[in-house]
Amino acid sequence: MSDELFDSVDALLSGVRTGLPDPAERRRLRLAAGLTVTQVAVALRVNSTLVKSWEDGTAAPDPDIAPAYTRLLDGLAARFPAAPAAPAAAPVEAAHGQAAGAPQQVMLDQNPDGSLVMGLPQPCVQCGQPSVYRAQGRPMHLGGWCRPAATPATPAAAPQPQQQPAPAPAVQAEPSTPPAPATPAAAPAPGPAAAEPVRPAPAPAPVATTAPAARRPANSRPSARPSVPPAAPVAPAAAKWWPMVALDTAPDGTWALDIPGFPAPAGTKLGDWFAWLGTGLPLRVERAHPSGRGGDGTVCLTAGALGQLGLPATLPTTEKALAALQAKLAKAAATVGMEISEQIGPTFRAFRRAGSAGGQKTSVGIVAAPWLGQGDARQQATNALALPLATAPDGTVDGATFARRFRAFTTDLGVAPGATTASTGMLLLDAVRPRIEWVKDPATGEWSSHLREGALPSGDVAVPPVAGARHPLTRQLLAAGETVCEEEDYKWWARELTPQEAARPWVVAVDVCASYLSVTDSLRLPAGPLELVERPDWNKGKDAGFWWCDFTTTEVDELLPHPATFHGRPPTGPGWYATPTVAYMATTYGFDPATLTQAYISTHTVPLLKEWTGRIRAGYKRVYAELGLTDGQIPAEFLAAYAVHKDIGGDPVRADALVLASAYKNVYKGGIGKWSDSARHLNDEQWLEKVAASWSNRAEIRFTIIAAARIAAHRRLRKTMLLTGRAPIAVNVDSYLYATDAPTPLELLPVKDDGTPVPGALRLGIAPGSHKHESSIPLQAVIDATGHREHPSKLVHHYTTDGTYTGPDQAAADTTDEQEGDN
C-alpha cells in the first residue's frame, strides 16, 4: 500500500504548477504552432526526450532551461490563445452533440502519468471531424483544433492511433518518397505505447516545393519491423527512421529538406546546425537482422547548405586550409558538446559522447555532396561508391540526388552503401547474417559476444590447393610444380565452325543476366575449415569441398566448352575441383566418384548467401521494373524494352533506377570477388595480417560460387543444344556467340508446344540466369577476327543489336572482357 501512496503523491507533485503552463497546455501551444518536439529541442539546445517529458508531465525543466522555455510558451500563447473557458456543463453538452457555434475549450481525458488518452479516430462531437482524443470518453479535439465540417481531414485524421497534426516547415517535398502508411512525418503524441519506427520506401524523384507528405506510388513498398508493445507506458518514439536527409536552402533563405515534415535547424549558423544534429533526429539505418546492428543516419549537405553554413564550395587542397576548416567545425561543434572526425573530407562524422554537456549520446554521418570525388587518394577511395550515386544525369554532383538514391539503396538492400561495391557486399552479408551474437548473463547482468551458429570464423584458414592467388601457400605449390584449384569463369573459348554454321550470315551474342545470383540462393558453401580426407565418401555431393579428380577419360560434348575447365579445353591431368563441378560431371557425363582419392571437405556446409542473394535480387528486380523490364515478358516484348531501357530522357525515376541497377550488379560481383581479395596496395606482410586473417577472405567460397555459375551456364548450353541442335561457337565469361540466320536470338530459343520457354534452357529475360541480346555481328567479321588470332567476343561492343557497326572508338574498354556482362 505504501508504494501506491508514494506513487500517488509523486503524481500529485508532478502536477503542481512551476510557473509554466500545465503539460497539456504546453503541448497544445506547440501543436497550434505546427512545431515538432525536435524543433523545440533544437531551439532550446536539449534532448528531444526532455521536451516530451515536459509535455506529458513526467518531468519539469531545469532552472537554467525554464526561463527560455517559459519565453517560448508565452510567445506561443500570445499568438495562439486558448478558446474562452466554457461552463462546467459544456463538455457534457458537447459530448451529447448539443454544442453550437464556436468550438468549446475542453479538458481532455488523461492517463495517470499526465499523457492524453487516445484511441481510434472518431468524429469529434464539436466539429464532426475525426479526433483521436477523448473528453469524458467521447471523441473531442484539443481546444482550438476543431475545424469546419467542410474542411478536409488533416493527416492526423488517418486511421492510426497516437497521431498528431503534421508540421509545415519549409521543405523540399518528394512526392514519390512515401512515409509509412497514414503516418505523418511529425513524432507521435504521447500515449500508452510508442509507435515502432518504420523504415520508409525509397524516393525516386525530388520536387522543390513545400508540401505535406505525398502519396505513395503503387510500386513503393515500405517495410517495418514487427511492433512489440511495451509492458508499461514509455516515452513516444519517432514515427519512422530515415537513413539520410538532404539539407538545402529555399529561395527565401530558410532551410529546405527533401523529406516532408522533417524538422529543420533553428538557425543558419554552424552552432545551430550542430545543435540540430545532436537533438535525436529521426535518422538511422535499421538493422536487417535481430542479432545485427543498425547504423547511424546521415545528413547530406547540398551546395546551397554549404554556402548557408559558411563552408567552402570545394574541399580545401592544402593542409593549412584543411586544418583551418577542421578547427572551425570543431569549435562550432564544441558549443553544444559535440565533436567531429579527426580527418575532414567529403564524408565525416559528428558525435556526442555519453555524459557530455548538451544532450544525449549521438552520432550522425555527414556527406558534403559537392566535395565527393575530391581530396587525397584515401578520401576518394573511401567515397568510390558514393560519387556515382550522387552524380545526376547532367554530370553534376547533386546532394538531393544522392540522398534520394541513398535512401532507395538502403531500403532495397537493408544496408547503407559502403566505401566500394566489394566492401558493401561484405557489409550486406554481415547485416543479413550476423557473425556475432550478444547474450546477457542472467546472473551477473553482463553482456558477452560469441560466434553465431554457422558463422565464418576469423583467422587464416586457407589450405594449400585453394588458398587463392595471393596466398604464400599457393605460391609454394606453384613453385614446386604442384596443382592448385583453377575453378574460374570461362575465358576465351572458341571452336571451328561447322558447315551449317559457316553458311549462316550472322553471329548473335547473348549475355547471362546476373549469373552469380542465379546460383547463390541455395548453394551450400564451405563455412567451416577444410580438412584433408583420404578416400573420401562422395555422399552424393552433399558436402562442400574440393576433390582430387581425373576427368581426362570422361567424354563430354564436343561442340561445347569442357564443363570442368575455365579455358574450355579438356584437362590434361588430374586436378582439384569444387563440389558443383564434380557433381555435374558425375550426374551428366558418368564420372565415377568411387575413383576419388583425396578431398578437402568442409566441416560445416551452409547456404551462406541465401539472405544476401534475396536482398540483392529483390532490389535488382525492382529497379529493372522501373526501367520497363520485368519477369515473364514474352521475348519480343523483352527485346523491345531492353533496347530502350537506358533511354532515361528527363525522367529522374528512370535515371535513379539505371544508376542503382549498376550499383547492385557491382555489389554482388564485387562481393563475390572479395572472397579472394588480393589487395595489391598492401605488401605481403600487411596482406597476411589485414586480409588473409579476415573472415571475409575465403578463396574456397569464391571457387565454389564460380564453379556453380559455370556449371549452371554449361547446363543451359547443353539443354539448348539437345533441344535445338544449336551450340555456341565462342564463349567468354557469360557471353555466348551463336551463328544465326538473322540478327536476332529468337531462332535460338527452345519453346514448348504452347510457345512458352523451356525451363533450364536459353531464354530471354531480365531475371537472374536469363539472357539478353548484346549484339549482332556479321559472320565475315568473326572469321576475319579469328584469322587475326583475336577472340570473337572482342567484337561484341563493335556492333549494335541490329548489326550496325559502331567502330572500336565506341567499344567498351577491354577491362570488361573478363568480367560479368552488363547484368
Image (spheres, rainbow, N blue to C red):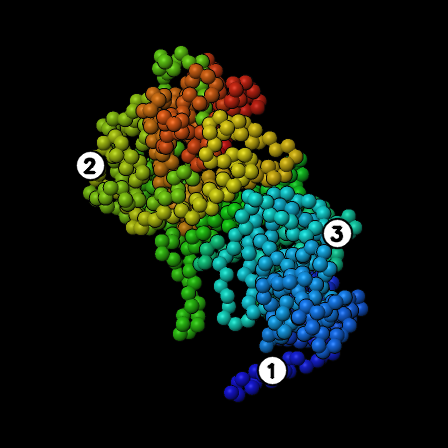
Q: Which amino acid does label 3 sit on?
A: Gln
Few, some or many residues within 10 Å of mark 3 (<14, 14–19, 20+): some
Residue 226 visible here? yes
Q: In this view, does 331 lie above or below 682?
A: below
| Cα–Cα gap, marks 2 and 3 | 74 Å
Few, some or many residues within 10 Å of mark 1 (<14, 14–19, 20+): few
Mark 3 vs 1, N-terminal side = 1
Side of 289 where 598 appears, left or right = left
- Residue positioned 65% across, 72% down in the render: 135
Q: What residue type is labelled 2?
A: Thr
Mark 1 vs 2, N-terminal side = 1
- Residue positioned 43% across, 55% down in the render: 434
Q: Is residue 537 above or below residue 627?
A: below
Side of 635 where 660 appears, left or right = right
Q: Judge depth for marks 1 and 2 and give the one in front.
A: 1
Asked if labels 3 and 2 touch by Cβ distance under 8 angstroms, the answer is no
Q: Nearer the viewer, residue 784 or 463?
A: 784
Asked if labels 2 and 1 touch by Cβ distance under 8 angstroms, the answer is no
> Which residue is farthest bottom?
2
Secondary structure state at the residue bearing disc 3: helix
Side of 399 where 593 appears, left or right = left
> In this figure, which residue is indicated by the disc labeled 3?
308
Estimate the x, y position of residue 706 in percent, counting from the top left.
38, 37
| Cα–Cα gap, marks 1 and 2 | 82 Å
> In this figure, which residue is indicated by the disc labeled 2?
595
- Residue positioned 44% across, 36% down in the render: 768
Few, some or many residues within 10 Å of mark 2 (<14, 14–19, 20+): few
Label for residue 10? 1
Q: Judge depth for marks 3 and 1 and give the one in front.
A: 1
